[in-house]
Image (cartoon, rainbow, N blue to C red):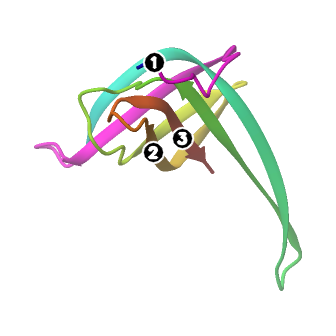
Amino acid sequence: MRWPRLVREARTPCKVTVWAEGIGEDGSPVVALDADLVCNYQSRARTVRTKDGTAVEVSGTCLFDGDICPGVAELAGGEVSVFGERRAVALGSKARNPDGTVNHTRLELV
């Protein structure tokens, strides 16, 4: 059975670096994916009040059709460069269809 694609119209170019779980021999993260992809990008901003003043927290979500990193079960972190700004990956998830295939990949950015 074919499952519907939930992420369509992915047209925003981005540079994605995803790290796998664990560390390399030199103590650096293990790079699982380093590619130029297209995504459906959604951004949001939040104002946080602190003692010293206010701070604006900008974050975003990148949605990719299918599995961008099929060899890795868990996305442990990474970086995404979108619209010329580099942002860290805070959360990565793979949304699965009932048959176990990956429908789309979601990266939450900070």
Can you identify the residue that label 3 sits on? 107
Q: Quadrant of residue 96?
A: top left
Amino acid type, label 2? Ser
Decide which of tag 1 and tag 3 comes sooner along the chain.
Answer: 1
At horizontal 46% and vertical 23% (from top left) the residue drawn is 66
Query: Looking at the image, is mark 1 or mark 3 nearer the viewer?
Result: 1
Can you identify the residue that label 1 sits on? 2
Circle 2 — which element? Answer: strand
Q: Which of 86 and 2 is in front in this view?
A: 2
User: Where does residue 57 sit, x and y in percent of width and height?
Assistant: 77, 58
Pointer 1 local density, CA inside 10 Å: few below 14, some 14–19, many at least 20: few
Magenta segment boundaries in residue numbering? 2-28
Distance of label 1 from label 2 (alpha carbons): 21 Å
Pointer 3 local density, CA inside 10 Å: few below 14, some 14–19, many at least 20: many
Decide which of tag 3 and tag 2 comes sooner along the chain.
Answer: 2
* Residue 93: assigned label: 2
